[in-house]
Image (cartoon, helix red, strand yellow):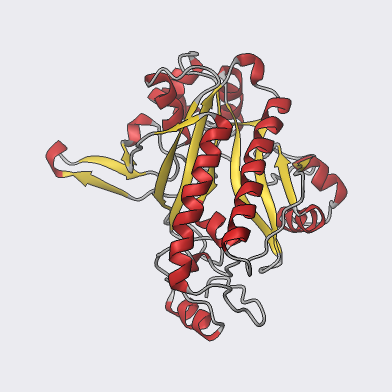
């Protein structure tokens, strides 16, 4: 059976019908906070794209896509998106968004190779956002400034939920802690990357782990990243401590996007030079797209965290193994 954590004595604070109402309130509130803080405007986005566009997200570089053919286009193949990292950057240029402004969208995806557990579902729903920046803003300082803006929106959301439901008490620290993946390895060299995340998240409660994708001094990677959207030197994950599951809890993956030099370097390092022929990759390498920063923020993850749920299936509808459903029923975890 897929890995399942069942907190001892777990009792949902609010029932499943009230949870449905709370989910809408959380989503409405947070997207307004995000849009205001980062100067974003909502746009529509695709559910599927053509393979030759190069716009689909390879995530860690190995996940398979869901694909089908279109009858009225001579059975041309298309792929269900896994995220919108590349599409958003193309959209910034197409919509002629000026520096300092950006877009966000409700992204829905199917990730068929996801390992199912309390936090991971085949169905992914997140706010995908992207903002135009200048060449000079491609710095760690600007990355951290953006992280703080998002973290402040998370804190505001926590206060809002606590006012709505007095029995839901979620307290975030005043500030988020910054650390690089290499600093984590230096501090806990014998621990695995996930163990390091648990250790630092429990200690700091809210952390941004920087520089993910490249190899550490040990020769290992902290985590995989596709080579063609984030600059591995200017990216990271926002991670909170989840005291229900007693584990690190990733809320967002984000970063400054690759420029010409970073794209060229990372494609070579990843052995993915064949992607240079895709339209998106050519546009980046030729300097035809805006410089940008962007990321994804899990909608169900956010609801799960602030409603103090033990399983992501308590805040979204998906497909789960029968043995997991039965075990959740025994442990008072109601899957929608």
* Residue 164 occupies quadrant: bottom right
> Residue 180 at x, y = what percent?
77, 39
Nearest the viewer among 215 and 182 is 182
Q: Is residue 174 above or below residue 171?
A: above
> Residue 274 at x, y = what percent?
45, 29
Q: Residue at x 56, y 24 (%)?
A: 263
> Residue 222 at x, y = what percent?
70, 46
* Residue 309 occupies quadrant: bottom right
* Residue 270 occupies quadrant: top right
Q: Residue at x 49, y 20 (%)?
A: 284
Q: Residue at x 48, y 55 (%)?
A: 25
Q: Is residue 291 above or below residue 204?
A: above
Q: Is residue 233 left or right of residue 258?
A: right
Q: Quadrant of the C terminus?
A: bottom left
Nearest the viewer among 114 and 330 is 330
* One can see residue 310 in this view: yes
Q: Is residue 87 above or below residue 185?
A: above
Q: Is residue 11 above or below residue 46?
A: below
Q: Residue at x 52, y 79 (%)?
A: 328
> Residue 258 at x, y = what percent?
57, 25
Q: Is residue 25 left or right of residue 6?
A: left
* Residue lying furthest right: 187
* One can see residue 227 in this view: no
Q: Is residue 246 left or right of residue 78?
A: right
Query: What is the count of numbered marks?
Result: 0
């Amino acid at each position: 059976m897929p890995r399942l954590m069942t907190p001892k004595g777990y009792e949902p604070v609010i029932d499943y019908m009230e949870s449905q109402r709370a989910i809408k309130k959380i989503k409405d509130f947070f997207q307004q906070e995000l849009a205001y803080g980062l100067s974003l405007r909502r746009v529509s986005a695709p559910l599927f794209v053509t393979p030759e566009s190069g716009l689909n997200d390879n995530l860690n570089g190995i996940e398979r896509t869901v694909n089908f053919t279109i009858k009225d286009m001579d059975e041309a193949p298309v792929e269900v998106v896994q995220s919108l990292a590349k599409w958003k950057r193309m959209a910034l240029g197409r919509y002629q968004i000026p520096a300092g402004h950006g877009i966000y969208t409700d992204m829905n995806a199917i990730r068929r190779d996801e390992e199912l557990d309390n936090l991971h579902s085949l169905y992914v729903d997140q706010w995908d956002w992207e903002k135009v920046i200048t060449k000079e803003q491609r710095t760690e300082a600007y990355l951290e400034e953006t992280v703080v803006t998002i973290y402040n929106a998370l804190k505001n959301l926590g206060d809002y939920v606590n006012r709505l439901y007095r029995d839901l008490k979620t307290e975030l620290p005043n500030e988020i802690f910054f650390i690089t993946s290499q600093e984590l390895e230096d501090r806990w060299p014998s621990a695995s990357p996930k163990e390091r995340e648990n250790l630092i998240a429990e200690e700091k409660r809210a952390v941004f782990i920087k520089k993910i994708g490249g190899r550490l001094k040990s020769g290992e990677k902290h985590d995989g990243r596709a080579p063609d959207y984030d600059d591995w030197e200017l990216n990271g994950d926002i991670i909170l401590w989840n005291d229900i599951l007693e584990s690190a809890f990733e809320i967002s993956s984000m970063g400054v996007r690759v420029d010409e030099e970073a794209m060229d370097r990372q494609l070579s390092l990843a052995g993915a030079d064949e992607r240079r022929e895709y339209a998106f990759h050519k546009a980046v390498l030729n300097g035809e797209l805006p410089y940008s920063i962007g990321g994804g923020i899990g909608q169900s993850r956010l609801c799960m965290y602030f409603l103090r749920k033990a399983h992501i299936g308590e805040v979204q509808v998906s497909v789960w193994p029968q043995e997991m459903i039965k075990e959740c029923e025994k442990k008072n975890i109601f899957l929608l």
